[in-house]
């Protein structure tokens, strides 16, 4: 069976600037695939092309076996799409059940099947007991779950989620991950755009890291982190330049990457052996360390290694 999503050099420009730049994406049947990148990376633009809402400037894409440009109706029929923001629903005077019934009819779910489809979707996202309240009375987390339910109502082959947990508290986010995991278990392919590192790490079988419209790297979270290898020691010091040159040629250093002002990330094989060296070198050179921590590599380290910037900082700045 061919891949559920297959793009070749998919490109979209706005006013001469590429929002999505020659992206080759392959999403296999049954996987949860993540598009991870900072604000403005081109995630939503990619998704809008894949859902046939926006025409590519160049390149091609097949979704569920159909070309997005020549067979858009076939594509739309097979996918569920949960947008980044669905503002009109928030004040709705309908109940979740009523909303989903309307949507089921819009998706041409036959009258006889409608109740079963709606009940199943409500059950799956844990909204069965709130099905007959007013939507405007639901919490933010429940709204997101309702969005999710409407995306999977017509039992799509492919579910596309744009920032499914944006702005949610930790507990609601874990809930959404669990529901998405359940769907994947049932064989639904899921494409999820996120700028949360932990979401990409926990939820996705594979992911593509994107930045400025371009693919940075693709792989499973484990593969990407393993490529870095070993441990990461993070040092904060006012004497960052001095520290960098003092350790530059040390045999225990695999790679040094700047992590913003005063912060240096040192990639080493084994932090327990390298930490005493870091302290000794600092002491010998009169360098005061403001902070010294070490950890296994995270997806943030993967992003930093490939772009020279930290995704975490970009998120906090935005
Ligand atoms: N309709 C449009 N007209 C002009 N520029 C656009 C349009 N849509 C998107 N862009 C630009 O394309 C780039 C990518 O935007 P996009 O919304 O795809 O990013 P994103 O990765 O989804 O970001 P976020 O994490 O903030 O949702 C941005 O520079 C954005 O300003
Ligand atoms: Mg977006």
Image (cartoon, grey):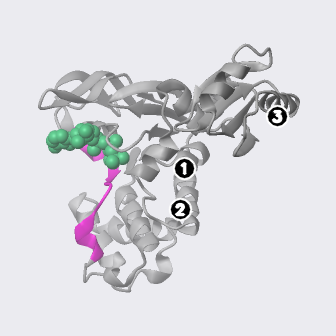
| Residue carrying label 1 | 199
Whether residue 4 appears in magenta in the rendering, the answer is no
Give the structural element (helix, strand or loop) at label 2: helix
| Residue carrying label 3 | 279
User: Seen in the image, is 171 located left or right of residue 214?
Assistant: right
Q: Earlier in the sequence, mark 3 or mark 2?
A: 2
Q: Are marks 2 and 1 in contact (CB under 8 Å)?
A: yes
- Nearest the viewer among 258 and 101 is 258
Label number found at residue 313: none
Q: Residue furthest left?
A: 15
How many labels were placed on the picture? Answer: 3
- Nearest the viewer among 63 and 296 is 296
Frontmost of labels 3 and 2 is 3
- Nearest the viewer among 240 and 77 is 240
Residue located at (64% from left, 32% from top): 265
Q: What is the x, y in percent for residue 134?
A: 33, 85
How many neighbours does mark 2 have within 10 angstroms: few (below 14), some (14-19), or many (20 or more)? some
Q: CA distance from mark 3 to mark 2?
A: 39 Å
Q: What is the x, y in percent for residue 76?
A: 25, 44
Q: Are marks 3 and 2 in contact (CB under 8 Å)?
A: no
Q: CA distance from mark 1 to mark 3?
A: 34 Å
| Residue carrying label 2 | 173
Give the structural element (helix, strand or loop) at label 3: helix
Q: CA distance from mark 2 to mark 1?
A: 9 Å
Residue numbers of the magenta segment:
73-90
Give the structural element (helix, strand or loop) at label 1: helix
Q: Is residue 204 above or below residue 80?
A: above
Q: Is residue 40 above or below residue 107?
A: above
Q: Earlier in the sequence, mark 2 or mark 1?
A: 2
Residue located at (41% from left, 25% from top): 215
Q: What is the x, y in percent for residue 318?
A: 37, 51
Q: Are marks 1 and 3 in contact (CB under 8 Å)?
A: no
């Amino acid at each position: 069976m061919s891949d559920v999503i297959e793009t070749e050099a998919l490109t979209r420009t706005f006013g001469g600037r590429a929002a999505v730049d020659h992206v080759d994406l392959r999403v296999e049947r049954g996987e949860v695939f993540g598009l991870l990148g900072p604000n403005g990376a081109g995630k939503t633009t990619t998704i809008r092309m894949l859902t046939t809402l926006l025409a590519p400037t160049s390149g091609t894409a097949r979704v569920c076996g159909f070309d997005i440009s020549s067979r858009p109706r076939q594509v739309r029929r097979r996918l569920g799409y949960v947008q980044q923001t669905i503002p009109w629903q928030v004040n709705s005077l309908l109940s979740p059940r009523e909303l989903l019934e309307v949507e089921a009819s819009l998706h041409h779910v036959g009258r006889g099947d409608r109740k079963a489809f709606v009940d199943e979707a409500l059950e799956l996202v844990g909204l069965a007991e709130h099905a007959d309240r007013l939507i405007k009375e639901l919490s933010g987390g429940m709204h997101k779950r309702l969005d999710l339910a409407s995306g999977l109502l017509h039992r799509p082959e492919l579910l596309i989620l744009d920032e499914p947990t944006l702005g949610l508290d930790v507990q609601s986010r874990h809930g959404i991950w669990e529901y998405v995991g359940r769907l994947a278990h049932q064989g639904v392919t899921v494409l999820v755009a996120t700028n949360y590192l932990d979401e990409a790490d926990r939820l996705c079988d594979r992911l593509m890291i994107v930045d400025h419209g371009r693919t940075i790297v693709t792989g499973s979270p484990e593969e990407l982190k393993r490529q870095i290898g070993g441990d990461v020691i993070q040092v904060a010091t006012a004497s960052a330049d001095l520290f960098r040159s003092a350790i530059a040629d040390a045999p225990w250093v695999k790679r040094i990457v700047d992590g913003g002002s005063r912060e240096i990330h040192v990639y080493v094989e084994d932090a327990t052996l390298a930490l005493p060296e870091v302290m000794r070198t600092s002491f010998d050179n009169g360098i005061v360390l403001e902070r010294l921590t070490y950890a296994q590599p995270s997806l943030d380290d993967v992003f930093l290694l490939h772009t020279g910037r930290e995704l975490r900082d970009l998120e906090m700045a935005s």
